[in-house]
Amino acid sequence: MASQNASSASSSQQQSLPLSNSDVYIILSWMPSVAIRSLLYGMYITLSMIAIYLFLQKGISFQHSRGSDSSASAKARLALFILTIIMMVFSTISLVLSTEFYITQLPLFSFHSPNLPKIMKLLVNEQIVLLFMERMNYLISDGIVVWRAWIMFPDQRVVGLALTFLMLSSCAGVFVDAGLASTALLGNPSNVGSQTRGFIISLPTITTNAVATGLIAWKAWNHHQDLKKNLQNSSSLTRVQKVLLLLVESGTLYCLLWVAYITISARSGPSANSFQELSSAMPFISALYPIIIILIATVESKDRDDRGMSLSLSQSIRFASVQSPVLSTAGVEGETNSKHDSVDVVGVDV
């Protein structure tokens, strides 16, 4: 009797069977995306924690004060601190949801038939939330890049209006793309989008970052020309020049990644493995990009404070533009070069 009950109980349990070749192929196709996301998230969260520590070390004040450069710097530092926290939350949710999206599909390969409508509804909801989380990172990243360019042209209203328009176009591209993707998923959960839908978010983002990077490159070139004119015997790059060059190079690389995103989407389609892997990386690259810039500003500013320097990047650039060519003497040149070693990349003394 006991043996019959044991046999009936074992027969009622779910049996484990080998996965088919197609199931194994599908699971293996998930691994590159999961690995890329996890790797970039690990890099991002490490750098974010370092940036948060440096912000807290410098001091974060929530009290409102008026009328001083230090007050403006404290407000900007607080804004960057909050944006760093928000991007970290969005990136964490993005990684969790993308991993959960794959785990939710595992019952589809089980021995017994799953509750298909429930699983499909859950998958659609996860994808929609993931879409918005990833695109908010794009938006915040563009905002920091625009801010970074804007503070180098404090008195140029045309530049400010152009950057504002480009930022609004990026906002429109992000929300229109997220809305269209969500609508398509609600209508057909297997819809991955057309080959041209990626242009909606990519083109405004590329344009915004290209213009911001171009403005920084133009400012870097003018700064270099001013230094050549005022410091004729100087052949080495100053710290400001090095950081401006790094900003231009990083912005160019970021734009090229978006160009690759568009190209792969148009040529291979959203269902291609290469596109899936790049689209998995882009949200975390977008989060890494401004964090690296913030860290450079933080480290350079800290080094400036340790050496007793007080000029910010914008002040250093203005200093170079008004000097006389007489400053080619060794003593004055050394003094000027030391002042040009100060860097404030994002307009905040962090």
Image: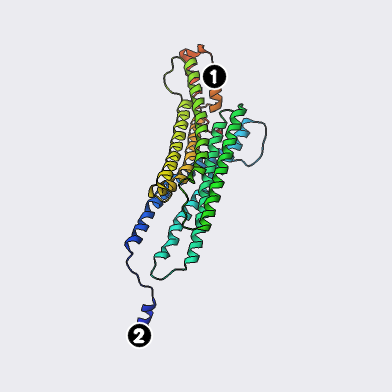
Dot 1 falls on a residue whose secondary structure is: helix
Q: Name the spot of residue 148 as percent of width and height, x first.
A: 54, 33
Q: Locate the C terminus and report the quarter of the image it occupies.
A: top right
Whether the residues at callouts 2 and 1 have beta carbons within 8 Å, the answer is no
Which residue occupies the foreground of this view, 61 or 318?
318
| Quarter occupied by residue 257 | top left
Residue at x 38%, y 50% (from the top left corner): 273
Q: What residue type is labelled 2?
A: Gln
Q: Estimate the spatial distance between the alpha carbons at disc 2 and disc 1, rounded to whole Å.
A: 94 Å
Q: Name the spot of residue 8 as percent of width and height, x first.
A: 37, 82
Q: Quickly name the residue at label 1.
A: 321
| Crowd rating for badge 1 (residues with CA inside 10 Å; few <14, some 14–19, many 20+) | some
Q: Name the spot of residue 288 as percent of width and height, x first.
A: 47, 42
| Quarter occupied by residue 153 | top right
Give the mark nearer the N terminus: 2 vs 1.
2
Residue 118 visible in rendering: yes
As displayed, is residue 241 above or below residue 78?
above
Q: Locate the N terminus and report the quarter of the image it occupies.
A: bottom left
Residue at x 51%, y 12% (from the top left corner): 325
Q: What residue type is labelled 1?
A: Ser
As displayed, is residue 177 above or below residue 253?
below
Residue at x 48%, y 58% (from the top left corner): 189
Q: How many labels does the image show?
A: 2
Q: Quickly name the residue at label 2.
A: 4
